[in-house]
Image (tube, grey):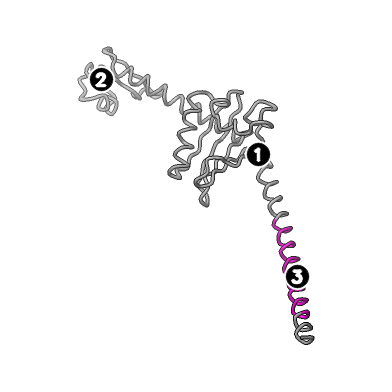
């Protein structure tokens, strides 16, 4: 009995020492991972942005970042979930587009990138991606060159829409309508102009530069 007790005590001490070494190693790894996580978080939030992450099967997302970018001052400290009410910080049409994009992201993993203007006049970029079983929504404010490019993109799309509407209007006009380049060649002609010049079509009139 005495010999068994001595052997059991020795084995117990060895087990405790081994467990202490393992615990110390795990604590060191945990500390290193925490430092690495802090570094990544500092780099990630070096610029004002908001991250929203939905895990699969969970409707309550994890929200982090500078919520004051989107919500009125002070409200983000009490109800961070308000950021999910897109109509509270976006114009109605943009809020609807955002809701549809987020629904497609969460249901089918369909990514998106939208440049939007908030109700307070800020230009933000929203990007949705499905990563590792999570739906991630990133919202950041655009500034400098990126904001200028985004504003040019918005202006470009608006001009395209206006041009398409004007072309559709001109195409239906019964009177000849046309436009010329600086060198005098036709850049546009409607169907009435083609008929007036005995051309087969408006494209034919422009190709042959008919008068």
Which residue in the rendered view is the most extreme toward the bottom? Answer: 3
In which quarter of the view is residue 120 placed?
top right
Q: Position of residue 11 (x, y in %)?
A: 74, 79
Q: Which image quadrant: the N terminus? A: bottom right
Report the mark closest to the observer, 3 or 1: 3
Which residue in the rendered view is the most extreme toward the front? Answer: 1
- Circle nearer the N terminus (2, 3): 3
Q: Position of residue 56 (x, y in %)?
A: 50, 47
From the viewer's perspective, is 47 left or right of 130? Answer: right
SS assignment at label 2:
helix
SS assignment at label 3:
helix
User: Which residue in the structure is indicated by mark 1?
Assistant: 65
The magenta stretch spans residue 17: yes
Question: Badge 2 local density, few (<14 within 10 Å), some, or many (20+)?
Answer: many
Q: What stretch of residues is rendered in magenta? A: 9-33
In which quarter of the view is residue 169 placed?
top left
User: Which residue in the structure is indicated by mark 3?
Assistant: 21
Closer to us: 127 or 178: 127
Question: Badge 1 local density, few (<14 within 10 Å), some, or many (20+)?
Answer: some
User: Which residue in the structure is indicated by mark 2?
Assistant: 191
Point 23% across, 18% down: residue: 197
Q: Vertical placement of 12 versus 110: above or below?
A: below
Q: Position of residue 88 (x, y in %)?
A: 57, 25
Report the mark closest to the observer, 1 or 2: 1
- What separation in Å lies between label 3 and label 1 (alpha carbons)? 38 Å
- What separation in Å lies between label 2 and label 3 (alpha carbons)? 87 Å
- Circle nearer the N terminus (1, 2): 1
SS assignment at label 1:
strand
Q: Position of residue 74 (x, y in %)?
A: 70, 27
């Amino acid at each position: 009995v005495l010999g068994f007790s001595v052997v059991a005590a020795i084995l117990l001490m060895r087990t405790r020492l081994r467990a202490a070494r393992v615990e110390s190693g795990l604590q060191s790894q945990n500390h290193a991972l925490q430092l690495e996580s802090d570094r990544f978080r500092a780099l990630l939030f070096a610029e004002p942005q908001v991250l929203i992450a939905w895990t699969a099967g969970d409707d309550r997302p994890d929200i982090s970042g500078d919520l004051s970018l989107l919500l009125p001052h002070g409200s983000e400290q009490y109800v961070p979930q308000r950021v999910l009410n897109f109509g509270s910080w976006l114009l109605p049409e943009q809020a609807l587009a955002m809701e549809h994009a987020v629904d497609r992201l969460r249901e089918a993993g369909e990514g998106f990138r939208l440049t939007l203007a908030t109700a307070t006049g800020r230009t933000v970029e929203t990007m949705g991606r499905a990563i590792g079983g999570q739906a991630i929504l990133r919202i950041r404010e655009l500034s400098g060159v990126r904001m200028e490019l985004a504003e040019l993109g918005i202006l470009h799309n608006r001009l395209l829409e206006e041009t398409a509407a004007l072309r559709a209007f001109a195409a239906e006009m019964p009177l000849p309508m046309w436009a010329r380049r600086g060198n005098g060649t036709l850049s546009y002609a409607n169907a009435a102009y083609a008929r007036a010049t005995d051309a087969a079509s408006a494209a034919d009139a422009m190709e042959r530069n008919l008068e």
